[in-house]
Image (spheres, rainbow, N blue to C red):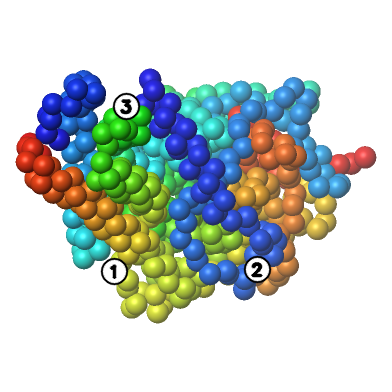
């Protein structure tokens, strides 16, 4: 996220969010790639890799999601835009889908396919939309786009 | 750590929500016994059914329950995870104290959780990696003399004596020791006799059985996964019965596709090789029934591609229709997830008339089924060399009435020179002896 000069936002919270928030997205995208590879090749490495990526994605998501929850609905609720709220909900659904997906990925071998693959697709789409709407709003405002 | 607390709360809430999705068993093990068990449709779960009682061991003076007309006594206690029993020609009883070598790496998040849950039952207790010799005292009743025969073994399970050689099946090799009648300690180092599949060791037990003429050794080798999820390359010579030629030490696959053949015995009337097998998990509380079967030379029994003949397991990709087409239907189902770990055929014994002939099977008990199944020793009657009727409970009472506590779990079976049935109990660290109640 950009470091917009928002007086009500804590620099520490923003820094933690900026540092940790990209990690789950990266994990879930990688998991999706691995799921595609597994469904094509049936080589167990990809399935097991995807299972770990989803779990790590979820663990890394805990702190930035709590920061986001606090900012959107408590500390910055007066300045939070519709986009911020949409981004919050998209992320929440993505996390719920990823949690279900973690359980689907605990199945043995090809029992993960195709459900696991479609859940990975859903997670990545939800998070992608969230990232895009936030970026578009930033661009419209004339602030810095991510990074 | 708030992150941890939040995580734990989330996980607990989810587990609670998801357990709602898992199912209770609807078929009793007895209903799923015999040569044509009802088999419900396979299911995929978010969270497979799991129920594990907590291992507490036996209280002073507490015993397993025996069927009417039987009595039970304790002949050894304080053992380190006794698994397998073997009676020597002079009547001494060998106990292999053992557990898995713990070499299976954690390669999935599921393993972290499932292993913790399963080990609460006491089934994960540390093995002694030794063979203890029990000798009946001439005078008093009560526990037998205990001698450490061989130490520093590597997850031993099967034991067989051929002439003056004692063969011990470690998890990765058959090792040969010199033995003379009456020995209570063997200090000579074991000589590696034949190597066995020893990587990963998802299923680590190696059952061992000598042919009556002592020319061959048969080895039950379990699979390296539930259903191929560790890759089929680690299943080389796995889920098979190996035949080792004693003269040349060469080995070959005698039969294959048997997921985990944990007990091998000769059926006394026909002289045929029989095995008990542990079937696959996580496709239902009533799937797949474990079984007792004659082992046909060159036979293929389905694992991992199919079960009970040609029923395809869709979890395996790519399938092998050529193998499935020739998959043999096992002779006799004994119920789902009962986990048979001990097999003993007995033509004549010190139990009442109805237990003469047929097979005793010890069932170590379920972890992925609710209510619990197994955790008992059963008897299966045989006629003309084939199992008939339903398994009858001989010894039970290994868990509390509320299914929360586990006192013991039966594993190895044999019979002593007086014809009494001996049962190794690896959760109770005890050896039990069952005879007819003369009162």
Q: From this viewpoint, which residue is outermost toward the right?
A: B439
First along the sequence among labels 2 and 1: 2
- How crowded pointer 1 is (Cα within 10 Å; few <14, some 14-19, many 20+) is rated as few
- How crowded pointer 3 is (Cα within 10 Å; few <14, some 14-19, many 20+) is rated as some
In the rendered image, the vertical position of residue B233 relative to residue A102, given as above or below: below
Same chain check for tags 1 and 3: no
The mark found on residue A75 in the picture is: 3
Residue B149 placement, left or right of B420: left
Residue in view at x 30 percent, y 43 percent: A85
Q: Marks 1/3: CA distance?
A: 54 Å
Q: Position of residue B413 (x, y in %)?
A: 62, 45
The residue wearing badge 1 is B318
Q: Position of residue B54 (x, y in %)?
A: 60, 33
Q: Quadrant of residue B400?
A: top right
Disc 1 element: loop
Q: Position of residue B63 (x, y in %)?
A: 76, 33
Residue B131 placement, left or right of B87: left
Q: Is residue A95 in sight in this rendering?
A: no
The residue wearing badge 2 is B34
Q: Nearer the viewer, mark 2 or mark 3?
A: 3
């Amino acid at each position: 996220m950009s470091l917009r000069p928002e007086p009500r936002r804590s620099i520490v919270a923003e820094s933690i969010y900026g540092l940790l928030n990209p990690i789950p997205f990266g994990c879930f995208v990688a998991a999706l790639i691995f799921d595609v590879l597994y469904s094509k090749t049936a080589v167990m490495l990809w399935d097991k890799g995807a299972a770990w990526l989803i779990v790590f994605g979820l663990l890394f998501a805990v702190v930035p999601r709590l920061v986001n929850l606090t900012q959107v609905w408590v500390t910055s609720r007066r300045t939070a835009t519709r986009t911020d709220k949409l981004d919050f909900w998209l992320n929440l659904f993505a996390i719920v889908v990823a949690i279900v997906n973690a359980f689907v990925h605990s199945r043995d071998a090809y029992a993960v396919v195709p459900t696991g693959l479609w859940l990975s697709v859903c997670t990545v789409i939800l998070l992608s939309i969230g990232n895009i709407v936030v970026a578009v709003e930033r661009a419209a405002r004339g602030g810095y786009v991510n990074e | 750590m708030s992150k941890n607390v939040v995580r734990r709360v989330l996980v607990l809430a989810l587990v609670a929500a998801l357990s709602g999705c898992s199912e209770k068993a609807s078929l009793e093990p007895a209903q799923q016994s015999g040569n044509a068990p009802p088999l419900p449709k396979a299911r995929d779960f978010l969270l497979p059914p799991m129920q594990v009682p907590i291992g507490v061991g036996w209280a002073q003076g507490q015993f397993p329950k025996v069927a009417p007309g039987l009595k039970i006594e304790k002949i050894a206690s304080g053992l380190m995870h006794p698994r397998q029993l073997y009676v020597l020609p002079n009547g001494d009883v060998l106990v292999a104290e053992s557990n898995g070598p713990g070499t299976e790496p954690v390669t999935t998040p599921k393993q972290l959780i499932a292993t913790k849950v399963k080990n609460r039952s006491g089934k994960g207790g540390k093995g002694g990696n030794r063979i203890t010799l029990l000798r009946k005292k001439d005078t008093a009743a009560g526990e037998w003399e205990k001698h450490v025969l061989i130490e520093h073994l590597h997850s031993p399970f099967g034991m067989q004596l051929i002439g003056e050689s004692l063969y011990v099946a470690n998890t990765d090799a058959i090792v040969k020791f010199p033995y003379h009648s009456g020995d209570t300690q063997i200090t000579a180092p074991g000589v590696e006799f034949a190597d066995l599949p020893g990587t990963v060791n998802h299923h680590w037990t190696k059952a061992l059985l000598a042919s009556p003429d002592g020319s061959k050794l048969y080895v039950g080798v379990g699979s390296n996964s539930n259903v191929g999820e560790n890759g089929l390359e680690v299943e080389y010579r796995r889920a098979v019965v190996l035949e080792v030629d004693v003269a040349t030490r060469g080995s070959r696959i005698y039969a294959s596709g048997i997921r985990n053949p944990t007990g091998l015995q000769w059926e006394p009337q026909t002289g045929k090789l029989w095995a008990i097998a542990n079937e696959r998990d996580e496709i239902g509380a009533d799937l797949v029934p474990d079984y007792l079967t004659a082992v046909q030379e060159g036979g293929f029994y389905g694992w991992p591609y199919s079960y009970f003949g040609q029923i395809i397991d869709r979890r395996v990709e790519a399938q092998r229709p050529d193998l499935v087409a020739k998959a043999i239907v096992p002779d006799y189902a004994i119920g789902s997830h009962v986990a048979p770990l001990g097999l003993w055929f007995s033509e004549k014994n010190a139990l009442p008339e109805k237990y003469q002939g047929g097979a005793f099977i010890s069932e170590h008990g379920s972890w992925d089924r609710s209510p619990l199944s197994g955790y008992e020793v059963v008897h299966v009657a045989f006629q003309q060399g084939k199992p008939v009727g339903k398994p009858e409970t001989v010894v039970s009472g290994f868990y509390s009435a509320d299914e929360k506590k586990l006192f013991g779990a039966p594993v190895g079976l044999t019979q002593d020179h007086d014809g009494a049935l001996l049962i190794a109990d690896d959760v109770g660290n005890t050896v039990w002896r069952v005879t007819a109640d003369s009162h």
